[in-house]
Image: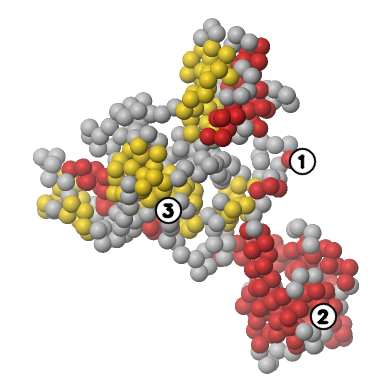
Amino acid sequence: MVILLVIAALYLLRGFLFYRIYQKAHANGWKAFVLILGELTLLKMVGRPAWWIVFLFIPGIGFFFLVILLVELLRCFGKFYIWQQVFGVLFALVYLPILGFSKKEVFHGPKYVQEHDKQSPVVAWMVAFLAFLVFPMLLAKVFYPAYGIVTPSSEETLLVGDYIGVPRFFASTKLQNNDMAVFYYPREESAEVSMFKETWVKRCIAIPGDTMEIIDRKVFINKKELAMPPTAEAAYRVSIDKKNAAGTAMYDEISNYMSAANPMQALNAQPIPKPPMLPNGSLTALKKLGIDADPSIGDIRRSIADMHDEAIFEMLMTTAASEKLKTIPGIKKVEIATQAKGDTLEGRLFPNVPGLAWTKDFYGPIYVPKRGDHIPMNLQNYYIYQRAIRDYEKNPGFALADDRITVLMDGKPIKEYEMKMDYYFVMGDNRDNSEDSRHIGFIPQDNIIGKASYILYSIDRAAPWYQKFRWGRVFRDI
């Protein structure tokens, strides 16, 4: 559905850009909006053969030939200087309507070009090639930049190697609940957007003014349960039966792979070659369920127990995958791994309030502040909002008094603070393998880049060269 909308939008844009140009070339303007007919009309206008249309629909090559046609079109308007052609291609979205609507601009046609342009055809092709290299980068940077996914924190919604599109031109950076947020990682030293900041992608769980709480892994927003995305992953304890052949084979293959993935047991130890996945082996069967043993993904996280007749591993997977896993020979039990209240084995979480027994699966309630909120300054709220107030809103004088109870602003006690920005609470869909707002706190509005709308394309870096491009993920909705 998305790809059809994108194609429709592109042809509407083309129609707007070329409508008056087609009319100046004595062609019907409406043809600029029509697939194939519009291409054939443009080829005829610039004096190129109709069979060139084949090249226009080949990915990559098609864009290069489109740039060539733009250069030829500019020449038909008498733009023979190289700088005119480069400028016309790079800023085509502005320049083409000028050519079409300006009364001073005249379409002379290909015969005029042959008689008056003494420039070598090679030069025109070189101009086209230069513009071909620069134009996509300029277009993407300004209108629709792509951001690559480099960590598995949002699997299976987003995979490592996915490149997502984030519209920026005329697009709002305001997010809604459940949007996939693209944002700059908030460093303590500054909340300002910077080219040196890391770009992260997480799901926007709570927006400004929401109260968020996690109870037994379930997320509640303003006391209403937020549906878990079907592609979200969680940690499961998987028991493998070592008393039968299938279980023993799975145990051996997983153990060998994990040993090779973590070889540096001693100083200067040599890496152990990673064993290949057997076509009909256990690891391949698990990967088909979305449980990838590759270290860059880490779905098989660790060994929990290794006994004579049973081995227990912690694995990350979707709910659907957990049900299918139970049917695989050699699997004894599959149960979700929940971190109980007060369990501090996973380390400290935001906001690190003394005596607060929150865990990643029992968290909150916590209020996400919005601009204009007057936050009471008690001790707990000091710890919850201190980073937002001190670092993001630039109040270095925000601190606790020597009694460790009274909240100060520039040395003076305060009873409340008025928030100057909106904030968001984000979480990765791979809930048990994600550093998110449960660890780093609120994301300020200034750091929000936008909403990830869909996957542009996807590359599987671990696959052989002939399988690297994930065709099924091109223009997929998020």
Whole-angstrom CA distance, mark 1 to mark 3, is 38 Å
- State which quadrant residue 456 falls in: bottom right
Of labels 3 and 2, earlier in sequence is 2
Label 3: state its secondary structure.
loop
* Figure check: 81 above or below 344: below
Residue denoted by label 2:
45
Residue denoted by label 3:
177
Residue 316: x %, y % from top left: 52, 31
Q: In the image, 11: left or right of 356? A: right
Tell me the amino acid under the disc marked 3.
Asn
The residue located at (24%, 54%) in the rendering is 395
Of labels 2 and 1, earlier in sequence is 2
Residue 397 appears in the rendering: no
Residue 400: x %, y % from top left: 16, 44
Whether tag 3 and tag 2 are in contact, CB under 8 A, the answer is: no
The residue located at (16%, 46%) in the rendering is 378
Packing grade of label 1 (10 A; few <14, some 14-19, many >=20) is few
User: As rendered, which of 227 and 122 lies closer to the eye?
Assistant: 227
- State which quadrant residue 324 falls in: top right
Q: In the image, 258: left or right of 380? A: right
* Figure check: 369 above or below 289: below
Residue denoted by label 1:
466
